[in-house]
């Protein structure tokens, strides 16, 4: 096991691994949903870790939280100039805790699953396959669908380090 400091957020190496996983996740999701880079530009998002989050973006569970904001193009008062902007709020403390307590989990593969999962949500929201604001029951059903889709996409990689992540029982379904 690598020597990580579990008392804080991610270290530089872990953040680098997270960004590498995000690049792969975006490519996988793009290929699966047939998205071009131009289409991603129409649905902007960013990934932020614990030290970059606002107080209300930090949660006890799950491993990442997707927050949607409304943005407006500069110098435009038109409501048509508004667009959705997503922030993937990575919960370092929850991820590091799960990693520490599940020795078979590879952190890079864990990042890959988490980011792929959140990107699938973004695609589904932007295509109106699911509403961002939904009842608790509807969110539960959506989580199950997104977990299934995440596993389907990642199984194509045939990475040995993904198997324990795909079999991980700690995914929150609520």
Image (cartoon, rainbow, N blue to C red):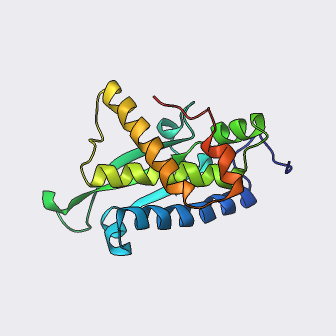
Question: Compared to 127, does 169 lie above or below?
Answer: above
Residue 130, position as x, y percentages in the image: 28, 43
* Residue 43 occupies quadrant: bottom left
Number of marks in the image? 0
Quadrant for the C terminus in the image: top left
Q: Residue at x 28, y 36 (%)?
A: 133
Is there any visible trace of residue 46 in the rendered image? yes
Residue 167, position as x, y percentages in the image: 63, 40
52 displayed left or right of 36: right
Front residue of 146 and 23:
146
Residue 25, position as x, y percentages in the image: 52, 61
Question: Compared to 100, does 122 lie above or below?
Answer: below
48 displayed left or right of 10: left
Residue 171, position as x, y percentages in the image: 56, 35
Q: Residue at x 81, y 48 (%)?
A: 4
Is there any visible trace of residue 117 in the rendered image? no
Q: Residue at x 68, y 63 (%)?
A: 16
* Residue 22 occupies quadrant: bottom right
Q: Residue at x 56, y 54 (%)?
A: 155
28 displayed left or right of 79: right
Question: Compared to 35, does 107 lie above or below?
Answer: above
């Amino acid at each position: 096991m690598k020597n990580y400091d579990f008392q804080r957020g991610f270290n530089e190496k872990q953040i680098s691994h997270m960004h590498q996983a995000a690049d792969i996740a975006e490519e996988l999701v793009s290929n699966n949903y047939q998205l071009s880079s131009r289409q991603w530009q129409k649905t902007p998002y960013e990934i932020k870790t614990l030290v970059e989050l606002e107080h209300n973006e930090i949660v006890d569970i799950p491993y990442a939280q997707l927050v949607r904001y409304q943005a407006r193009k500069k110098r435009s008062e038109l409501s048509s100039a508004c667009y959705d902007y997503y922030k993937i709020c990575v919960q370092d403390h929850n991820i590091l805790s799960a990693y520490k307590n599940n020795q078979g989990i590879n952190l890079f593969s864990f990042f890959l699953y988490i980011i792929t999962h959140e990107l699938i949500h973004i695609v589904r929201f932007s295509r109106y396959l699911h509403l961002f604001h939904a009842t608790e029951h509807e969110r539960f059903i959506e989580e199950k669908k997104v977990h299934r889709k995440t596993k389907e996409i990642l199984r194509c990689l045939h990475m040995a380090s993904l198997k324990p992540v795909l079999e991980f029982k700690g995914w929150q379904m609520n």
